Amino acid sequence: MDIWELDLAPNLSTGEPPQSETLAPAEFISDCRTKVDFALKLGYSEELVLLVLRKLGPDALINDILGELVKLGTKTEMEQQKGLTASHSSSSSLSSLTSNSSLESCQLQSPSPLLEDKHNFRPVVIDGSNVAMSHGNKEVFSCQGIQLAVEWFLERGHRDITVFVPAWRKEQSRPDALITDQEILRRLEKEKILVFTPSRRVQGRRVVCYDDRFIVKLAYESDGIIVSNDNYRDLANEKPEWKKFIDERLLMYSFVNDK
């Protein structure tokens, strides 16, 4: 990941000049590196990441790239298809990438040792409430959704995973607060993966902490990523550094057939 080569020559086959919105070389290299770094730290192989960039183009949004990576599967599945998609090589290329930015090639010459070491993955902070309610179609707090999210990262080599859930979710399920597979929360807590944020009752009313603040603060301080479909707009407006962090490190998701 140390050396990137860039060719920004006009598209000679069409005779069209480069478009005005084309990124400057330094900006494009930084943008491209950020996308590849992010995907590699989530456990995807270099070959798979480059394959997705060939398909979607270098201007693809990070969420589109990650969505395509999920579809293609894990590195093991990639190895089975490698004869059709990519070859083993110490240097991987993106020679077929051509987009509106008139990029013709972007070649990775020497991967960074940091990115090759799976023990250097960024910490993962999961918004448990957001994930559970999403898995329960916004009607049920489905703890199975949290389990699926944790397993997804564990299978890719991540070990520093933290899930935040409000403590009142330990209470018995009620018609106005349905919850399923509640034993998952207790098991993940014993495994030191799940943390309950404080809550208590005062004169019959529940008083809870703002768990979003726990999530953003831990992810920011640990230089990790946030797994949530929440945009944390109120917290982003509190601090400029939090806004930048949320913009760059928020990993959105979707469940398809419990995956």
Image: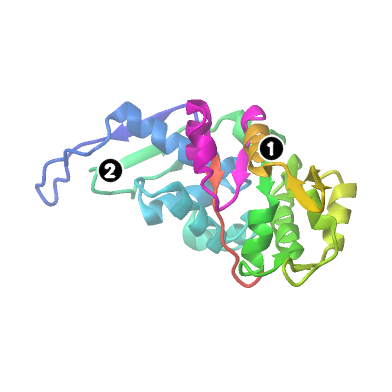
Residue 119 x, y percent position in the rendering: 72, 35
Residue found at the very far left of the displayed protein: 15
Near-viewer residue (126 or 140): 140
The residue pinned by badge 2 equals 104
Up the image or down, 99 lies above or below 148; here it is above
Residue 120 has which mark?
A: none
Whether tag 2 and tag 1 are in contact, CB under 8 A, the answer is no
Q: Which quarter of the image is occupied by the C terminus?
A: bottom right
Task: Identify the residue at image location x=75%, y=39%.
Answer: 160
- Position of residue 5 in the picture relative to residue 130 (left or right): left
Residue 232 x, y percent position in the rendering: 54, 43
Local crowd size for mark 2, using a 10 Å CA cut-off: few (<14), some (14–19), many (≥20): some
Up the image or down, 96 lies above or below 135; here it is above
The amino acid pointed to by label 2 is Glu
Helix, strand or loop at mark 1: helix
In magenta, the rendered stretch is 220-248
Near-viewer residue (28 or 104): 28
Residue 35 x, y percent position in the rendering: 47, 41
Residue 207 visible from this viewpoint: yes
Q: Tell whether position 211 is magenta.
A: no
